[in-house]
Image (cartoon, rainbow, N blue to C red):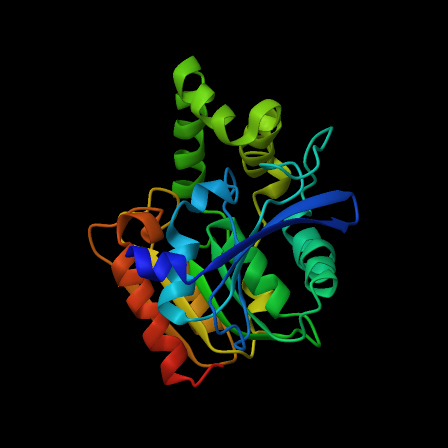
Amino acid sequence: MDVEESAALSVVDCFVSVPGGRLFVRQWRPARADKAPLILLHDSLGSVAQWRDFPAALAARLQRPVIAYDRLGFGQSSQQHGPAKGSFIDDEAHLHLPALVQALGLSRYLLFGHSVGGAMALAAASLPGSGCLALVSESAQAFVEDRTLAGIRAAKQGFEESAQFARLGRWHGERARWVLDAWTETWLSPAFRHWSLVPRLAHVHCPVLVLHGEEDEFGSAAFPRAIADGVSGVAQMALLPACGHVPHHEREAEVMALVEAFLSRHCID
């Protein structure tokens, strides 16, 4: 993104009260902000800051407001105590995201979810009366694969190294241990082994763009295929070669081009 594009955006931070605490929210607004905003939902270890320059680049490219927020327990949002609930995906879809949307006065919006954020976005869009006009699912899990669990176990072992755990602390501070455990202990628990998004997909009627890296270490191409085949609305799937779990960083220009073309094709204002 060049300097002129960046200067044309205003960036606004705020906190929004939701059940269980306060969410940190950042908004990137182009000079002309009459289009429905795009809300970003981060991954299992993510935060607003970890999207890096992607939200600003996306807002400038689409000429559309982009909103990102830290889920409860992450980044600058309220700390959480005790083990994460196994219902955390549904809780985000049913409680926290609707509370955020209501607080910001949004009747129409788009969703872009990365990893578990994609599952949350799809669960939210499946609810009756959802104001979601279109959705981008990036590297989302549709159920629990052996590959998913193997990737999480490997990541958990990697975070035993103090230097790697310290990097997580850069984003989450004293929340870092809770953030890591909320991911690894929930997904690796026997109770979560049979979680599946598939039953909810038929209730998603908005256009859905499904993005997935062919070398994603946390899920095979079975995930995007299940999502694209399962939703009731129009769906487009893109498998990105030589790409892992974070396409918006690994293939940022291609991801933005795919999103722009998809929204244009379906006349999403």
Q: Which image quarter is the N terminus in?
A: bottom left
Q: Could you tell me which residue is drawn at 50 percent across and 58 percent down?
A: 10
In this view, 207 is above or below 137? below
Can residue 139 be seen in this snapshot?
A: no
Q: As drawn, is 260 to the left or to the right of 119?
A: left
Q: Position of residue 43 (x, y in %)?
A: 49, 46
Q: Please name whichever residue, 67 or 203, is drawn nearer the observer in this view of the structure.
A: 67
User: Residue 41's image quarter?
Assistant: bottom right
In this view, 149 is above or below 243? above
Q: How many marks?
A: 0
Q: As drawn, is 187 to the left or to the right of 235?
A: right
Q: Position of residue 58 (x, y in %)?
A: 39, 62
Q: Could you tell me which residue is drawn at 65 percent across and 36 percent down?
A: 73
Q: Please name whichever residue, 101 or 241, is drawn nearer the observer in this view of the structure.
A: 101
Q: Position of residue 141 (x, y in %)?
A: 47, 53
Q: Could you tell me which residue is drawn at 58 percent across and 36 percent down?
A: 75
In this view, 97 is above or below 106? above
Q: Position of residue 210 (x, y in %)?
A: 40, 66
Q: Could you tell me which residue is drawn at 39 percent across and 36 percent down?
A: 151
Q: Please name whichever residue, 129 or 51, is drawn nearer the observer in this view of the structure.
A: 51
Q: Residue furthest top?
A: 162
Q: Residue furthest right?
A: 19
Can residue 211 be seen in this snapshot?
A: yes
Q: Residue furthest left?
A: 242
Q: As drawn, is 205 to the left or to the right of 254?
A: right
